[in-house]
């Protein structure tokens, strides 16, 4: 039979091309169907295009472009869940596809996902997105957790642990263990983003305990070394927040003691000791950390790379912290206590962030409030970020304000500032100047004056928030804008119940005590505790847990109290920001009475905090 690739199919899935003997070749059939889909899409016939693209991927499941086009059309048709599944399959087929990875990230950001069953192709697509340089791993955290929850090795491990049968060395070395520990999704998830799922944590905790207490022979298996390295990366991300048993603590102590005499360690003992220590604390804390990093080439990869990279990175952070410029003295008692907290636990230890449109700050404000609020003559604003922490806020805002802006970012904590400086270098953001300062001590002589001042999540940690706010107002030019973030008393009702319990029990803000208390929260069935655990990722890292539940100083506000403060400081409310999780109809951006009614109807409306813009009048 003659080949008839030029004949269009009469319906999606119809035969379009024939090979020898008249049998249609799936790839040719899919290509013809995809071409029909593209023609229909260009003509604006999206449902017809959807049908053709679906025919293409049915005829030839490995047709990458048809998967991409189908995902895009499904999204335009409002079928986001289907678009996600098809897009992830496209990533599984072509893990290098940065455009699809970025699009999926925007689609999945902050979306709660439930999967009924495990799908290897979806798992492969998620793993590809987690590791793609164009994608923000945090965007894929929730769907990765959903996939891992229904993945048989994880669900099986969790069930076994609850039945008193945790994994052992024999399981790790078995075919089942090897398959589980080398799964790309597991390794990518551990290495690239923070786990916030309690069931998955149960599995990871049991695996860490197994590795720490298993006989040395387990470390001869390359797949065990690779998994242990990924788990060590997760522990760096969550700052070693998992609870530690006495047996584990003893194993970690022995590992550290061995490493302190590493010259005497044989090769077969050095690797187990290094990886065990790395699972329970930063290797940089070892007195001979630099020597261990220098000798990392003798270790098998990826363990060798991890040891070298983690120690080198942490030593560099310490050096940078010592070199940070200081603008003001730190004299206030509460400020010194807050500084001490963040020197011990810089917060947050972020990896990536949602990138705003470059130079798009006026568009953002106009979309929020109908006007940018600042004179059009201000094309390159001078901006102060007060309380910049580890840099996520100032670096994100630096992109939004554009490279012509002049941004000063200050914080109490040198360790936090060091992290921010290193992230700025990694992201090649050069127009933010970092300095140590107590905002209470800032003056125009020390810092200058500003068109825009941002203080989000800062003032409520001062002894007198209004006094600190007044200092910032004095640095703001006439007609300038302020972006302020303050905790909501209503929004933090569940958190306050937990903080009250911590105070009543006298639990100190020390790592072991925080880990132990956090473990009681994970095991709690109290509704207010479950809401905190499932709604706030902070509880799943040590610095986040301390910031959320053990902070040394915290004030909370109501909208009427904010209105009084604005009046006292001669500021006018410009706009209250809407959070991504606000689904209901909302009042106008400056309608304070409307927002008060909305929060009364939904106390979780400002669960994170109030974030609002105001203007100096």
Image (cartoon, rainbow, N blue to C red):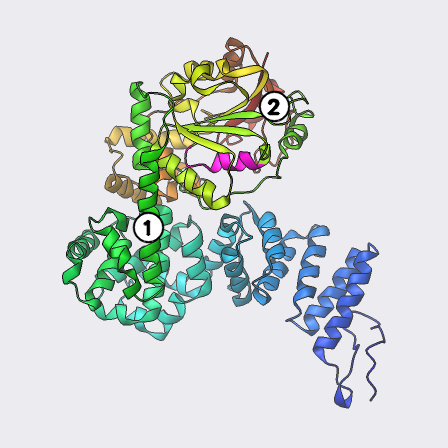
* Residue 522 in picture, x, y percent from top left: 35, 45
Residue placed most toward the observer, 563 or 261? 261
Q: Is residue 272 above or below residue 113?
A: below
- Local secondary structure at mark 1: helix
The residue lying at 22 percent from left, 49 percent from top is: 286
Secondary structure category for the residue under label 2? strand
Q: Which mark is residue 312?
A: 1
Location of mark 2 (residue): 575
Q: Which residues are magenta?
A: 389-399
The quadrant of the image that shows the C terminus is top right
Q: Is residue 13 above or below residue 603?
A: below
Decide: few, some or many residues near mark 2? Use Cα within 10 Å; few <14, some 14-19, many ≥20. many
Mark 2 or 1, closer to the camera: 1
State the mark number for residue 57: none
Residue 482 percent location from the top left of the image = 54, 21
Quadrant assignment, res 5: bottom right
Spatial distance from mark 2 to mark 1, Cα to Cα? 44 Å
Counting residues from the start of the chain, the first of labels 2 and 1 encountered is: 1
In the picture provided, is 256 more to the left or to the right than 275?
A: left
Q: Residue at x 49, y 16 (%)?
A: 475
Q: Quadrant of residue 170?
A: bottom left
Q: Is residue 248 above or below residue 172?
A: above
Q: Can see residue 552?
A: no
The location of residue 203, given as percent across then percent down, is 35, 58
Q: At 50% from the left edge and 32% from the top edge, which residue is drawn? A: 604
User: Is residue 415 or residue 403 the one in the foreground?
Assistant: 403
Name the residue nearer the viewer: 60 or 160. 60
Q: Say which residue appears at 33% left-offset and 20% top-offset.
A: 329
């Amino acid at each position: 039979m003659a080949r008839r690739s030029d004949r269009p199919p009469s319906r999606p899935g119809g035969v379009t091309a024939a090979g020898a003997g008249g049998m249609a070749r799936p790839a040719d059939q899919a290509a013809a169907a995809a071409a029909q889909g593209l023609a229909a899409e260009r003509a604006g016939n999206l449902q017809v295009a959807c049908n053709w693209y679906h025919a293409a991927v049915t005829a030839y499941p490995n047709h990458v472009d048809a998967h991409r086009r189908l995902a895009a059309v499904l999204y335009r048709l409002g079928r986001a869940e289907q678009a996600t599944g098809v897009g992830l399959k496209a990533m599984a087929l072509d893990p290098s596809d940065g455009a699809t990875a970025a699009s999926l990230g925007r689609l999945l950001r902050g979306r709660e996902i439930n999967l009924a069953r495990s799908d290897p192709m979806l798992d492969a697509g998620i793993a590809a997105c987690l590791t793609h340089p164009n994608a923000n791993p945090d965007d894929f955290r929730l769907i990765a957790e959903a996939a891992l929850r229904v993945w048989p090795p994880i669900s099986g491990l969790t069930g076994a642990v609850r039945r008193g049968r945790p994994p052992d060395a024999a399981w790790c070395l078995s075919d089942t263990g090897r398959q589980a520990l080398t799964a790309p999704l597991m390794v990518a998830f551990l290495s690239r983003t923070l786990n916030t799922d309690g069931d998955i944590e149960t599995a990871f905790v049991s695996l860490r305990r197994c590795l720490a207490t298993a006989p040395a022979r387990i470390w001869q298996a390359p797949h065990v070394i690779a998994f242990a390295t990924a788990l060590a990366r997760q522990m760096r991300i969550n700052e070693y927040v998992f609870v530690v048993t006495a047996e584990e603590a003893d194993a970690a102590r022995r590992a550290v003691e061995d490493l302190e005499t590493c010259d005497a360690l044989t090769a077969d003992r050095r690797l187990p000791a290094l990886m065990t220590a790395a699972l329970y604390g930063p290797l940089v804390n070892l007195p001979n950390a630099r020597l261990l990093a220098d000798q990392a080439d003798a270790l098998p990869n990826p363990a060798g790379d991890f040891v070298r990279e983690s120690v080198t990175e942490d030593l560099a952070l310490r050096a940078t912290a010592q070199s940070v410029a200081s603008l003001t003295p730190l004299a206030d008692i509460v400020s010194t206590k807050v500084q001490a907290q963040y020197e011990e636990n810089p917060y947050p230890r972020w990896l990536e962030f949602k990138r705003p449109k470059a130079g798009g700050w006026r568009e953002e404000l106009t979309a929020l409030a109908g006007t940018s609020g600042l004179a059009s003559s201000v094309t390159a604003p001078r901006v102060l970020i007060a309380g910049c922490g580890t840099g996520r806020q100032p670096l994100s805002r630096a992109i939004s304000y554009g490279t012509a802006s002049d941004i000063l970012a200050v914080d109490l904590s040198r360790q936090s500032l060091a992290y921010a400086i290193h992230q700025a270098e990694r992201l090649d953001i050069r127009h933010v100047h970092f300095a140590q300062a107590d905002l209470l001590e800032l003056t125009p002589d020390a810092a200058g004056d500003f068109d825009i001042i941002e203080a989000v999540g800062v003032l409520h940690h001062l002894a007198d928030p209004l006094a600190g706010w007044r200092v910032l107002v004095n640095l703001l030019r006439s007609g300038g804008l302020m972006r302020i973030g303050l905790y909501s008393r209503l929004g933090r009702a569940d958190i306050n119940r937990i903080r009250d319990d911590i105070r009543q029990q006298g639990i100190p803000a020390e790592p072991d005590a925080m880990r132990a208390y956090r473990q009681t929260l994970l095991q709690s069935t109290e509704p207010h505790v479950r809401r905190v655990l499932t709604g706030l990722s902070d509880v799943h890292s040590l610095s986040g847990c301390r910031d959320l539940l053990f902070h040394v100083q915290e004030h909370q506000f109501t909208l009427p109290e904010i209105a009084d403060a604005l009046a006292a400081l001669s500021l006018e409310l410009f706009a209250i920001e809407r959070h991504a999780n606000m689904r209901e109809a909302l009042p106008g951006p400056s309608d304070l009475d409307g927002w008060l009614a909305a929060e009364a109807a939904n106390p979780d409306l400002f669960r994170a905090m109030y974030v609002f813009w105001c203007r100096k009048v």
